[in-house]
């Protein structure tokens, strides 16, 4: 990456969420993911992009009461331009890249799997396309017995032989052993780091893989970040989110990052299938995870195509998860995962509308009418036109529109001198 | 706002009727509107006023400070005074004032600095960036880059540090205004810089200096040019600058002119603090003092390399003389254009001679590291797991330390770069790197074309100012009516007195050169198994200060030494007499009581024969007690200290039984890295010799440039 290639929106997101030096605390405390997500939702109600904040910064528009971040903080964050440029130049000079949620090459699967928790900024090295390739996450504790170690190594190798990418926490123990296995069979690996990206990227053990496109390192923490237990824990969800399946090689019971990460994933409504190694003498955590919904790793997977077996074995889980989804969540999720071509996105939304209607009984009236209103707004309409089309009383419609605006789904736009309601392009939402 | 700015301008200039120069207000307005601007205006137009007024108005709006990146060492005193009148406080951070950094950092963090001036190379130092710059960068409201033409590959003055500055500018969000300024650039460079910076507005003023009378004089031999300077320096009005291409010439010409009674001082990057005013002053302080003396007309001239340049502003500078031809028209214009800003008559005289081309070619060829060096360095770094220090690289590679440093510096400025310095170690990055040989070849071609254009300038019959104006794409330059070509005769006499020329040759023959003793071995284990265990060469094992008769190939003795070594195979008696004269002036104490020399298996008689004759004339014995016991590679093929010393291990032996008592004169024909004399001297000292005085016929030190 050269600094020339950083888009203006990415720069704005970096200003909002990035850490560039010790002056970052106090007035200009960078936004946490949740805070950024709230701000992004507010931006959508204005039909703004993050870059628009740079121009609005001095203006009255930021006095909006709904602005979820204090205005002073926002201004302090946005005035860190030179600090940001210095940091970004330094990283790119060392061969690292930065991807922001607004960038085209931000991995879609992170948005799909994590939604509002999708990290605003990713730092990394190596071929960033690997981030979209999915694969199998192999996780486990640092201290693993020889049986677990050989399982991890064999699994890394077998995955590579089956053309499946390995996603790893790149820590010592299971992570590293599985990576070696994958490399030995010529496979690709995504390493999700919790610290020290810069040092890792220039270290002898990773340099060659990064250069050859076999390894991609990625982190949500700045490249200079040192080790911290909190960061190491919060990294787990990204390991799962970047993979299609996960296999737990060894987990302590109710302690350690592996247990916590697996448990968190199993609680996730929209989770990846989690398999666990069940052999004689596995740690107690392994068997306990099965009770919490993890699947025993099928023996047959060693003999057949790993992907096929795991897909088959997890089919039952998938449908079960689908069933549980509450409607409102379903809607936003459809939006978030909508493909980028507009035609398709309409098609998906129509379908959602139908689906929602059939199940309307379980939700509020607003949930039920929302898809209908949105469907009606395929073409822009004035409030009056919409009222006639839907045959509803104006005050009622106004209430619904107000909510839709707040959710960033529709907005007012002046078209040929009349104020019309239009739908906010779901793609726009994707890009924040 | 314009009215407010104008008021500030008048206060700053302490002139209630002052008005903006053309383009100044537009430029300030652009800053307030967060624009990216490139401003091309000749020096003296008032760039600094734009920085100051822009900063003042931003400060009034509650904004942060201005970061000004500029190669100039500090703001001129009059500029600081002007800034002070409108409450703008400036501070400078460069390698010359490290002792002040702490207090400046504290002022920065307290918000007590409005304009921070930093040298471009500070941005290539990640340690400095992390420790200092990153801490205040949160509050930068205006990003200003001076001498912005250095960004362009096409520029006459491309600098690796500016590559990183460019990347930083590209990463800036659009709410940070960028102001890039330069005094010289042709269309191609202006366009290139504007595109790369993403500059929306380019403002450009006329470049021609109306008061400047130009003339070119060809004098092939440096002695003739020295004679010309000695004779005609006082014909030139006021105080001025004499530019030389090398540091050595800056020192040599200064010494000569002082001998001839002229009040001149040498100015270059190696000027150290040992001046008559203040022995403790650092080089940067000393240079500041020298600048002040020129500003106050306390010297007739500074004899300077390009080190005196960017940002130096003396409106009444009376003349600029070039001792050698510069490498390009842009260089020449930039240097000669320092004269005649605010006086009616000023002179720009370009002398030119035989050696110019050789020196300029050396500059061109050494601008980029050869591919082989880059490959070697990258191979070593790629083989290392956790990086290598430069010292470790020296031990692994037969490359000159300066070349390793230079190659790393250029590689590190690439973006993305194949190397990264983390702490003190260099690492290979995961970047796949391929040297862009075509780009380098193109650059060489540009440099050669620029040189050719200077030759054309030297020989042209057209108006000289018009020639410069055309070469710089300054539209509508008419004939100046002042230069030697317009006048049809010399504006300053081009005659040279032959008596003075002879005197200059004699002077060159008496310019003896000091051989500083080395005080440290390149590494701890260099003689393992250890005979000389310490890194420091202890006092008792050191050589004393020595002398060299000439510089290799110089117009004094240098050519005679070269003939003796490579043509006749014997050093002439003239050289013996030269050394006798030198010893008289030098007078090493305690006086040597015997003579010896560095033995050679390749030329077993050359130096001993000379030493024998010298000893005869001195009337003291010659004892060949140093012998070479092992053949080794030619020392000149060893490229860095570590390799040079390794190549000398167990090579020489001192026969202490044959060794006379008393201090010794140690003779060698050529001294380059000084390691041979250092090693032999340490062995002589160990054998009980109380003092060793090295004497060489020639000092070969291209690396000293």
Image: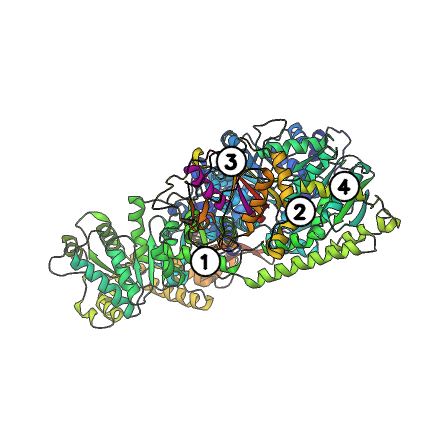
Secondary element type, mark 4: helix
Residue at numbered disc 3: B544
Tell me whether circle 3 and circle 4 mark residues in contact (CB < 8 Å).
no
Q: Earlier in the sequence, mark 1 or mark 4?
A: 4
Residue at numbered disc 1: B376
Q: Earlier in the sequence, mark 3 or mark 2?
A: 2
Cα–Cα span, label 2 and label 4: 16 Å
Which subunit holds the residue at mark 1? B
For disc 3, the neighbor class at 10 Å (few under 14, some 14 to 19, many from 20) is many
Residue at numbered disc 2: B245
As rendered, which of A317 and A183 lies closer to the eye? Answer: A183
Mark drawn on residue B455? none
Cα–Cα span, label 1 and label 2: 31 Å
Secondary element type, mark 3: loop
Cα–Cα span, label 3 and label 1: 37 Å
Q: Would residue B685 be found to the left or right of residue A263 on screen?
A: right
Which subunit holds the residue at mark 3? B
Q: Earlier in the sequence, mark 1 or mark 2?
A: 2
Q: Residue at x 50, y 63 (%)?
A: A379
Which subunit holds the residue at mark 4? B
- Whether discs 1 and 2 lie on one chain: the answer is yes
For disc 2, the neighbor class at 10 Å (few under 14, some 14 to 19, many from 20) is many
Foreground mark, 2 or 4, reads 4
- Whether discs 3 and 2 lie on one chain: the answer is yes
Does B63 appear above or below B38? Answer: above
Q: Earlier in the sequence, mark 2 or mark 4?
A: 4
Mark drawn on residue B229? 4
Tell me whether circle 3 and circle 2 mark residues in contact (CB < 8 Å).
no
């Amino acid at each position: 990456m050269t600094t020339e290639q950083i888009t203006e929106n990415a720069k704005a997101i970096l200003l909002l969420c990035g850490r560039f030096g010790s002056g970052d605390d106090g007035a200009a405390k960078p936004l946490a993911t949740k805070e950024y997500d709230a701000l992004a939702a507010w931006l959508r109600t204005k039909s703004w992009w993050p870059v628009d904040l740079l121009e609005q910064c001095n203006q009255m528009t930021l006095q909006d009461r709904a602005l979820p971040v204090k205005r002073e903080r926002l201004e302090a964050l946005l005035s860190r331009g030179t600090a940001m440029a210095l940091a970004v130049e330094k990283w790119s000079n060392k061969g690292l890249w930065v991807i922001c949620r607004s960038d085209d090459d931000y991995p879609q699967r992170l948005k799909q799997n994590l939604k509002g928790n999708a990290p605003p900024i990713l730092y990394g090295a190596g071929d960033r396309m690997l981030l979209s390739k999915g694969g199998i996450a192999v996780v486990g504790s640092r201290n693993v017995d020889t049986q677990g170690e050989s399982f991890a190594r064999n699994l890394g190798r077998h995955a590579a032989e089956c053309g499946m990418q390995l996603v790893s926490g790149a820590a010592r123990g299971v992570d590293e052993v599985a990576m070696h296995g994958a490399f030995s069979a010529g496979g690709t690996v995504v390493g999700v780091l919790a610290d020290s990206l810069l040092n890792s990227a220039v270290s002898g053990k990773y340099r060659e893989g990064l250069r050859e496109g076999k390894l991609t390192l990625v982190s949500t923490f700045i490249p200079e970040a040192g080790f911290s237990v909190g960061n190491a824990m919060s990294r787990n969800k990204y390991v799962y989110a970047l993979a299609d399946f996960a296999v737990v090689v060894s987990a302590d019971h109710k302690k350690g990052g592996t247990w916590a990460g697996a448990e968190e994933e199993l609680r996730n409504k929209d989770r990846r299938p989690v398999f666990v190694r069940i052999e004689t003498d596995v740690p107690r955590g392994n068997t306990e995870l099965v009770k919490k919904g993890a699947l025993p790793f099928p023996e047959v997977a060693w003999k057949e195509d790993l992907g096929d077996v795991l897909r088959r074995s997890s089919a039952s889980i998938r449908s079960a998860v689908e069933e549980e989804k509450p409607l409102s969540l379903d809607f936003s999720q459809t939006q978030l995962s909508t493909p980028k071509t507009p035609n398709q996105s309409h098609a998906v939304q129509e379908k959602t509308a139908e689906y929602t209607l059939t199940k309307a009984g379980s939700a509020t009236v607003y949930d039920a009418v929302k898809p209908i209103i949105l469907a009606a707004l395929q073409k822009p309409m004035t409030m009056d036109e919409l009222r006639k089309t839907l045959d509803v009383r104006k005050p009622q419609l106004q209430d619904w529109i107000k909510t839709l605006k707040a959710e960033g789904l529709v907005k007012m736009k002046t078209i040929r001198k009349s104020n019309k309601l239009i739908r906010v392009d779901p793609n726009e939402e994707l890009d924040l | 706002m314009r009215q407010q700015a104008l008021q500030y301008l008048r206060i700053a200039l302490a002139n209630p009727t002052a008005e903006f120069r053309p383009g100044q207000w537009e430029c300030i307005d652009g800053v307030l509107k967060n624009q990216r601007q490139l401003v091309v205006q000749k020096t003296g137009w008032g760039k600094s006023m734009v920085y100051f007024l822009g900063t003042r108005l931003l400060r009034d709006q509650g904004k942060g400070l201005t970061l000004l990146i500029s190669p100039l060492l500090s703001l001129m005193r009059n500029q600081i005074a002007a800034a002070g009148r409108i409450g703008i406080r400036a501070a400078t951070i460069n390698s010359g004032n490290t002792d002040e950094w702490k207090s400046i950092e504290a002022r920065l963090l307290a918000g007590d600095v409005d304009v921070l001036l930093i040298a471009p190379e500070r941005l290539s130092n990640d340690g400095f960036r992390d420790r200092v710059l990153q801490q205040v960068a949160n509050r930068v409201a205006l990003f200003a880059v001076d001498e912005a033409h250095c960004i362009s590959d096409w520029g006459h003055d491309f600098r690796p540090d500016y590559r990183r500055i460019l990347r930083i500018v590209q990463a800036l969000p659009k709410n940070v205004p960028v102001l890039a300024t330069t005094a010289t650039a042709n269309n191609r460079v202006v366009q290139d810089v504007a595109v790369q910076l993403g500059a929306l507005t380019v403002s450009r003023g006329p470049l021609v200096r109306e008061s400047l009378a130009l003339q070119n004089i060809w004098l092939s031999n440096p002695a003739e040019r020295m004679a010309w300077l000695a004779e005609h320096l006082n014909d030139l009005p006021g105080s001025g600058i004499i530019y030389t291409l090398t540091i050595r010439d800056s020192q040599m010409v200064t010494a000569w002119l002082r001998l001839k009674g002229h009040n001149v001082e040498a100015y270059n990057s190696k000027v150290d603090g040992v001046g008559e005013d203040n022995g403790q002053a650092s080089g940067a302080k000393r240079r500041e003092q020298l600048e002040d003396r020129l500003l106050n007309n306390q010297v007739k001239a500074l004899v300077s390399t390009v080190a005196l340049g960017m940002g130096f502003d003396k409106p009444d500078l009376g003349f600029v003389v070039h001792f050698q031809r510069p490498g390009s028209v842009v260089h020449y214009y930039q240097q000669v254009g320092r004269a005649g800003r605010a006086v009616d008559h000023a002179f720009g005289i370009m002398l030119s001679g035989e050696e110019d081309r050789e020196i300029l070619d050396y500059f061109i060829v050494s601008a980029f590291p050869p591919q082989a060096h880059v490959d070697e360095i990258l191979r070593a770094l790629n083989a290392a797991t956790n990086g290598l220090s430069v010292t470790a690289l020296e031990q692994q590679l037969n490359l000159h330390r300066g070349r390793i440093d230079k190659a790393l510096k250029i590689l590190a400025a690439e973006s993305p770069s194949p190397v990264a310095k983390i702490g003190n170690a260099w690492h290979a990055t995961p970047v796949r790197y391929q040297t862009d040989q075509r780009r380098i070849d193109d650059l060489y071609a540009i440099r050669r074309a620029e040189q050719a254009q200077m030759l054309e300038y030297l020989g042209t019959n057209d108006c000289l100012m018009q020639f410069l104006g055309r070469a710089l794409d300054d539209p509508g330059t008419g004939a100046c009516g002042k230069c030697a070509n317009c006048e049809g005769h010399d504006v300053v006499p081009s005659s040279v007195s032959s008596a003075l020329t002879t005197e200059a040759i004699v002077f060159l023959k008496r310019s003896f050169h000091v051989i500083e003793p080395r005080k440290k071995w390149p590494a701890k284990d260099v003689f393992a198994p250890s005979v000389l265990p310490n890194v420091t060469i202890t006092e008792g094992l050191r050589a004393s200060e020595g002398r060299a008769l000439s510089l290799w190939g110089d117009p004094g003795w240098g050519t005679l030494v070269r003939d003796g070594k490579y043509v006749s195979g014997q050093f002439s008696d003239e050289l013996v007499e030269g050394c006798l004269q030198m010893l008289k002036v030098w007078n090493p104490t305690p006086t040597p009581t015997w003579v010896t020399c560095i033995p050679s298996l390749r030329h077993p008689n050359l130096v001993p024969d000379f030493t024998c004759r010298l000893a005869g004339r001195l009337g003291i014995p010659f004892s060949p007690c140093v012998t070479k016991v092992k053949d080794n590679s030619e020392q000149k093929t060893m490229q860095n200290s570590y390799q040079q010393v390794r190549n000398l291990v167990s090579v020489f032996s001192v026969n202490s039984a044959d060794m006379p008592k008393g201090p010794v004169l140690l003779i060698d024909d050529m001294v380059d890295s000084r390691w041979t004399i250092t090693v032999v001297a340490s062995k002589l000292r160990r054998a009980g010799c109380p003092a060793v005085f090295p004497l060489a016929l020639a000092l070969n030190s291209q690396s000293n440039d």
